[in-house]
Image (cartoon, rainbow, N blue to C red):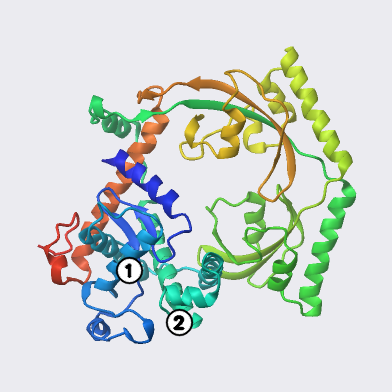
Amino acid sequence: MQLKTINLKSTIKQAMLFGVLWFGWQANAQEIIVTDSTSIQPEKAVAQADVDKDTGGRRKVDGIAAVVGDYIILDSDIDLMYRDMKSQGISTKNVTDCQLAGSMMENKLYAHQAIQDSLVVSDAQINSYIDQQISSMVKQLGSMEKVLEFYRKDSETTFRNELFELNKQRQLSQKMQQKIIEDVEITPEEVREYFDKIKKDELPVFGDEVEISEIVVKPEVSEAERQKAIDRLNQFRKDVLENGSRFSTKAILYSDDTRTGGDILTLGRKDPFVKEFKDVAFSLREGEISEPFKTEYGYHIVKLVKIRGQQIDVRHILIIPDVDKASIEAAKEKIDNVRNKIESGEITFADAAREVSDRKQTKNEGGKLRNPETGDTKFEQTNLPSDLYNQVVDLKEGEVSLRISDADDMGKPFYKLIRVDKRIPEHKADYSTDYLRIKDLALQDKKLKTIKEWQKDKIKDTYVKVSGKYRDCEYTSNWLKK
């Protein structure tokens, strides 16, 4: 069952990546989990359900399907979900009202308990995400007026308020689930037990796999360009501290970090941010702006906007120093010389990576790439990112590529060599050779069981009322409290 769940999760993620605008999806062993409508107090539920919203082109809010804690699920929410799925080209053939109702109730339970446990989400981060959502909607439909017409909303303000509640609920649900499983670990004995319980004819089949190594050479930035970047950041900092400029405006207009565009970032000490960035950010007082500092991405200044317990809200400005033509040509020559030495046998690929590679994540392992999902060195070839797939698909085992031109997330150019260290044909899971992947499956299975146990306990202590035809459903969780 767990293997099917993982496949379902992957399918949903691909199909709905930034596509379904109303519902946040997750996979559960037996139910599809959906984040759906806005919150409402239980005592107000009946009053809202009786209101006719059919005027003005808006949909009629009909009966109550269920109430979980402080949240309500309406019959019309489930109808809307079906329409939204179909509009995204997602098959609803095997999806039932009962499944969707159960999924909604699960997410309402997570969000309700997150509030009870005082988990918080950043309003600024939610509003930033809503801006991205609406921008995407307008791009798809042509105008804000068409977006409001499609979703049957009277005004942009009303629409934004509803999106805010939807996204807040989704984030609360995610945080609660993360909290439930954050301390779940698995022992080698549990991995063995998990594997031994899989019938031989049900063992997962792993497709063609590859092990890959790389050598990366980045053009060097001149001292003049470094100082130029630092001087710009110091001027921005001075403008804010002494001349009354807004840090957020400077970030939006001048930061080279196109992914955030000056938006607020919420981070904790364990979040996967660059160490140098976190060290500086967590050393600041609320409202303080750092001096310029360097990371692998370039030079930054950071403003600590708000402290939220173990998390902080920050804004930053990134300046990426330019590289000149001479530096680019020097990098090309350097990596070509490295390849010639490898091909002539003067140096091994692994030693060359340790000696000259500029990618610190792989340098010390002789250039060996690790799968971020499993921690293993094996990659299922068909699951490789498209650019990497195209770079390795025609390479024979042990073959080194010609020089490859590439660019990082910030658009900075670099050059690399790729070698396919090993090719592993499609095969059924083997405990000794596929241990790390089996361990990951076993851990996911244990996390799902932990979540189900948490649900079982919390349903007992939470106000739950299931109405109408949804009382006749067979749920995997005890929503009817029989």
Between marks 2 and 1 in the image, the one whose residue lies nearer the viewer: 1
Residue at horizontal 68 percent and vertical 45 percent from the top: 408
Question: Can you tell which quarter of the image residue 360 is in?
Answer: top right
Q: Which mark is residue 110?
A: none
Would you place residue 73 above or below residue 443 in this image?
Answer: below
Distance from Cα at disc 2 to Cα at disc 1: 18 Å
Residue at horizontal 37 percent and vertical 34 percent from the top: 439
Q: Position of residue 96 (x, y in %)?
A: 22, 57
Residue type pointed to by label 1: Leu
Q: Which residue is tagged 2? A: 158
Residue at horizontal 24 percent and vertical 86 percent from the top: 47
Helix or strand or loop: what does disc 2 sit on?
helix
Q: Which residue is tagged 1? A: 80
Q: Which quadrant is the N terminus positioned in?
A: top left
Residue 473 is at least partly visible in this image: yes
Q: Earlier in the sequence, mark 2 or mark 1?
A: 1
